[in-house]
Amino acid sequence: MSVINGNTRLCGIIGYPVEHSLSPAMHNAAFEQLALNWAYVPFLVRPENLTAAVAAVRAFNLAGVNVTVPHKQAVVGYIDDLSPAARLSGAVNTIVNLSGNLIGHNTDGEGFIRALREEAGISVKPDPVLILGAGGAAKGVAVALAINGVSEIIIANRTGSRAEQLCHWIKEQTGCAASVLRWTGAPVTGSGEYRDWASVLGRVKLIIQATTMGMFPRENDVPPVPFELLNSGHIAADLIYNPRRTRFISSCEAAGSRVLNGMGMLLHQGVIAFELWTGRTPPVEVMRRALQEKVSK
Ligand code: NAP
């Protein structure tokens, strides 16, 4: 890292916990590569200190911060303006400080879209798209898909009521068509909402694994996808990056599908944040190497 002096610009990440974050390694490697007098530090911010932490972004004239669990939704109420993706998703993962005016962005979903394009050569619109999961990551990705022109999204989630809520929200807020695939795969007679796995997998090209299933240390968990129905026409993206190869990824690959892990999304959400803060073109490969060195498997 370059020497800290009176001109050093500071940015960082606020979260609780925050010590596991890979972002300091990624951003500091990029600053060093470009010889920018910038530094990125982790800030452990308890929920009760969020208001003070946001005020400190202004008071300390930070260039901006990333925002992680559990503050992504709560922080929305404390900043001055929101990007379309942040407004739609109701979640902020990047704050840019423009002379005291704090702008909230959500680069997670856009990072996923960019990863698809840069890492797999896929410019979306492989309608319809199947998303496994109905948590924050699923919602962020659904928003980015809708903004990027996808017109139909199918949601499958262990807790059916959360899948229905997300489905309803997608239809209301994005104008995208949305429906629910029952997690167990059984079609529900009399309901227009549910479709069975076979009919869905026969229609979708892109499957996005956005649950925590298979994430370290529960690496044996795998969503109940009938992998034998997959083929080389499917693209399977897991948002998990630790481990790099989840059981979902290896099962899809064994069925002949193209696969993508969550490393690309993690990288590109950071790449976009870097662009927003510095206005510079980031050294993407340096950032990727810094991440890869930190992820064990
Ligand atoms: P979240 O809001 O807590 O949602 C968790 C999701 O996982 C829910 O859909 C939940 O289903 C499901 N789930 C959890 N345990 C399960 C189990 N045992 N069986 C079936 N489903 C289960 O988490 P999130 O923020 O959306 O994160 C989801 C994943 O995305 C995480 O693995 C995270 O690391 C990854 N992610 C990656 C990036 C990246 O940059 N690559 C960015 C953000 C997130 P229920 O509704 O039934 O509980």
Image (cartoon, rainbow, N blue to C red):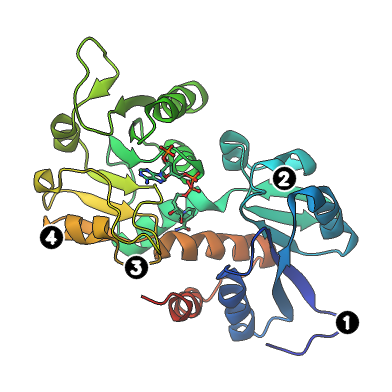
Mark nearer the N terminus (1 vs 2): 1
Residue 12, placed above or below residue 159: below
Above or below for 225 versus 259: above
Give how far across and how far down residue 2 sits, in percent: 71, 89
Disc 2/disc 4 C-alpha distance (Å):
42 Å
From the viewer's side, name the closer residue of 102 and 257. Answer: 257
Q: In terms of sequence position, does the residue under pointer 2 or pointer 4 come before the other?
A: 2
Residue occupied by mark 4: 254
Q: How many marks?
A: 4
Please tell me which residue is depicted at 66% across the width and 85% down the height of the picture. 35
| Residues at marks 4 and 3, CA–CA distance in whole angstroms | 16 Å
Question: Which amino acid is tagged 1?
Answer: Gly
- Disc 2, disc 4: CB below 8 Å? no
Residue that mark 3 sits on? 244
Query: Residue at horizontal 13%, vertical 33%?
Result: 198
Q: What residue type is disc 4 on?
A: Ala
Q: Nearer the viewer, residue 222 or 5?
A: 222
Mark drawn on residue 122 = none
Q: Secondary structure at mark 4?
A: helix
| Secondary element at image label 2 | helix
Instruction: State if disc 3 and disc 4 touch (CB < 8 Å).
Output: no
Mark 3 residue type: Arg
Disc 2 marks which residue?
75
First along the sequence among labels 4 and 3: 3
Secondary structure of the residue carrying tag 3 is loop
Which amino acid is tagged 2? Answer: Val
How far apart marks 1 and 4 lie (CA) works out to: 55 Å
User: How far across and how far down the image is residue 48, in percent?
Assistant: 79, 48
**Disc 3: residue Cβ within 8 A of ligand 1's nearest atom:** no
Measured from the top left, where is residue 129 in percent x and y?
A: 30, 38
Q: Is residue 235 left or right of residue 179?
A: left
Residue identifier under label 1: 6
